[in-house]
C-alpha cells in the first residue's frame, strides 16, 4: 500500500511538507509521528488521499486487506469464487489456478484474467437479474455453489446489502463472504455521498445490520489497512430475513452516521496471524468435517505467515476474541435498528 503515498497533486508547499514528513516517519517506523503529520495535513485540507492512506498505515499496522484475501484463497481453496468490484484485477488476480472465478464490474479493466476466470462488465444487479439466467447451464450451476465471495463494489450500503442477499442464496455450506471498506478511517470518509478521494462510503452499515438481524452468522472484522475487511460465515442460503426486510432496513439505516458507538458494533479483531482461527474453525464445522486441531493447523500452515498455534473454538457473542479483542454482542432484535444501541448523534471517530 505504500505505493499510494506518492504525491499525485502539486500541493502547496506547507501541505506538501506535512505529507512528506509523515511519509518519512512511516519509513523509519515512527507511527506516532506519522499519525501526527498526516493528521495535521488533513486538518488543513481534508481531501488529501496520500495523507489518508498514510494515516491508515500509521494507525492500522499489519497485513493489508489484499494479503488477507490471498490467505483466504490459499486456506479455503474455493472451487468457485465471485468478486463484485473487480476494477483493474488486483484482488481478482489472487485467485488460485484451480478456482473458477467470476468477476462482476461495469468498469472492469483486467489486463490478465485468472486461468479459469471470467469478467462480466455489468452491475451486480444486472448480472443476477439479467445475465446469469442467460449463461450456459454448467456456469449457472457453478454459481449455485459459491465457496468464497468478495464484495467491493460501489461503496454503497444499498448495493452491498443487495449483493450479500444475492450471494448468500448461492453459497455452499461453509461458504465465506468477505466485505471490504467496513472500518472507515473517519466519519468524513464514511458518508454516503463522496466528498474525498479516499472514500469508503457507507458499506460499513452492513455489519451492524447483519449483527442485528442475523445473529446466526459468524462475523469478524479484521483491523486491516486501509479500511478493514469483514469476514462472514455460518451462511444460510434458505434465509429470507434480509430480503423480506430490505426496504425497511435501507430506510432505518439511511441517516445513521459513522461514530464511535457504531465502531463498537463492527466485531473488530486484532490484525494478527491468529485472527482467522475462529473463521477456520467455523468453516470446518459448517462443511461437516471433524474440527480437529491437526486439520485446521494444516490449513493454516499452508498460509504464509500464519502462526500454527492451538485451535480456538467458536467465540460466542461477548466472548474474548483472539489476542484479547472483544466480540461485541449482537444488537437488539426487537426492531430493525435499535436506537438505544446505535445513537444517531455524532460521537466522533
Image (cartoon, rainbow, N blue to C red):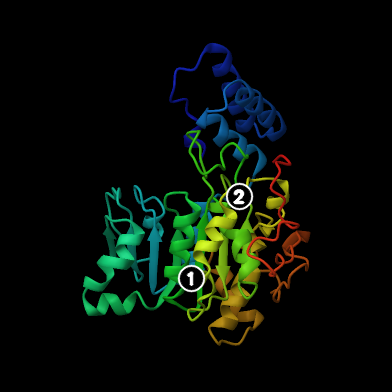
Kindly identify the residue that appears in the image at 66 percent across and 80 percent down. Answer: 293
Kindly identify the residue that appears in the image at 69 percent across and 32 percent down. Answer: 30
The label shown at residue 108 is none
Kindly identify the residue that appears in the image at 39 percent across and 53 percent down. Answer: 85
Q: Comparing marks 2 and 1, which lies closer to the viewer?
A: 1
Residue 210 image-quadrant placement: bottom right
Q: Residues within 10 Å of mark 1 (few under 14, many from 20)?
A: some
Is residue 68 positioned above or below 78 on the image? above
Residue 31 image-quadrant placement: top right
Residue 175 appears anywhere in the view: yes
Kindly identify the residue that appears in the image at 54 percent across and 18 percent down. Answer: 16
Relative horizontal placement of residue 8, taking residue 210 as reference (left or right): left
Relative horizontal placement of residue 154, taking residue 18 as reference (left or right): left
Tag 1's secondary structure? helix
Q: Residue 188: image x %, image y %?
A: 59, 36
Is residue 56 positioned above or below 311 on the image? above
Q: Residue 44: image x %, image y %?
A: 61, 20
Is residue 236 positioned above or below 277 on the image? below
Q: Residue 330: image x %, image y %?
A: 70, 67
Q: Quick one: 204 or 174, which is closer to the camera?
A: 204
Residue 95 appears anywhere in the view: no
Q: Which residue is mark 2?
A: 183
Q: Quick one: 285 or 251, which is closer to the camera?
A: 251
Q: Quick one: 163 or 289, which is closer to the camera?
A: 163
Relative horizontal placement of residue 198, taking residue 292 as reference (left or right): left
Q: Which residue is mark 1?
A: 243
Q: Residue 213: image x %, image y %?
A: 62, 69
Residue 40 image-quadrant placement: top right
Q: Residues within 10 Å of mark 2 (few under 14, many from 20)?
A: many
Tag 2's secondary structure? loop
Amino acid at each position: 500500500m505504500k505505493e499510494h503515498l506518492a504525491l499525485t497533486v502539486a500541493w502547496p508547499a506547507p501541505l506538501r511538507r506535512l505529507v512528506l514528513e509523515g511519509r518519512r516517519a512511516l519509513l523509519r517506523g515512527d507511527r506516532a509521528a506519522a499519525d501526527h503529520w498526516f493528521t495535521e495535513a488533513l486538518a488543513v485540507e481534508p481531501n488529501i488521499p496520500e495523507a489518508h492512506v498514510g494515516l491508515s498505515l500509521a494507525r492500522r499496522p499489519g497485513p493489508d486487506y489484499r494479503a488477507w484475501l490471498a490467505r483466504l484463497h490459499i486456506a479455503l481453496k474455493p472451487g468457485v469464487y465471485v468478486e463484485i468490484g473487480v476494477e483493474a484485477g488486483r484482488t481478482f488476480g489472487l485467485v488460485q489456478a484451480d478456482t473458477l472465478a467470476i468477476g462482476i464490474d461495469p468498469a472492469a479493466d483486467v489486463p490478465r484474467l485468472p486461468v479459469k476466470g471470467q469478467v462480466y462488465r455489468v452491475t451486480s444487479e444486472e448480472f443476477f437479474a439479467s445475465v446469469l439466467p442467460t449463461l450456459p447451464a454448467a456456469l449457472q450451476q457453478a454459481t449455485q455453489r459459491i465457496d468464497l465471495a468478495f464484495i467491493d463494489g460501489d461503496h454503497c450500503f444499498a448495493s452491498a446489502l443487495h449483493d450479500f442477499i444475492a450471494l448468500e442464496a448461492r453459497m455452499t455450506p461453509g461458504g465465506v463472504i468477505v466485505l471490504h471498506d467496513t472500518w472507515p478511517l473517519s466519519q468524513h470518509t464514511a458518508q454516503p455521498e463522496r466528498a474525498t478521494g479516499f472514500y469508503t462510503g457507507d458499506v460499513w452499515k452492513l455489519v451492524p445490520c447483519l449483527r442485528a438481524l442475523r445473529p446466526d452468522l459468524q462475523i469478524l472484522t479484521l483491523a486491516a489497512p486501509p479500511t478493514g475487511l469483514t469476514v462472514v460465515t455460518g451462511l444460510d442460503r434458505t434465509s429470507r430475513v434480509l430480503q423480506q426486510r430490505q426496504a425497511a432496513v435501507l430506510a432505518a439505516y439511511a441517516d445513521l452516521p459513522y461514530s464511535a458507538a457504531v465502531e463498537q458494533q463492527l466485531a473488530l479483531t486484532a490484525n494478527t496471524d491468529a485472527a482467522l482461527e475462529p473463521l477456520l474453525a467455523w468453516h470446518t464445522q459448517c462443511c461437516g468435517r471433524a474440527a480437529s486441531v491437526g486439520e485446521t493447523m494444516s490449513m493454516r500452515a499452508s498460509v504464509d505467515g500464519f502462526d500454527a498455534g492451538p485451535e480456538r473454538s467458536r467465540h460466542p457473542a461477548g466472548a474474548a476474541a483472539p489476542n484479547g479483542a472483544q466480540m461485541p454482542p449482537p444488537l437488539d432484535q426487537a426492531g430493525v435498528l435499535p436506537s438505544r444501541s446505535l445513537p444517531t448523534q455524532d460521537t466522533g471517530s
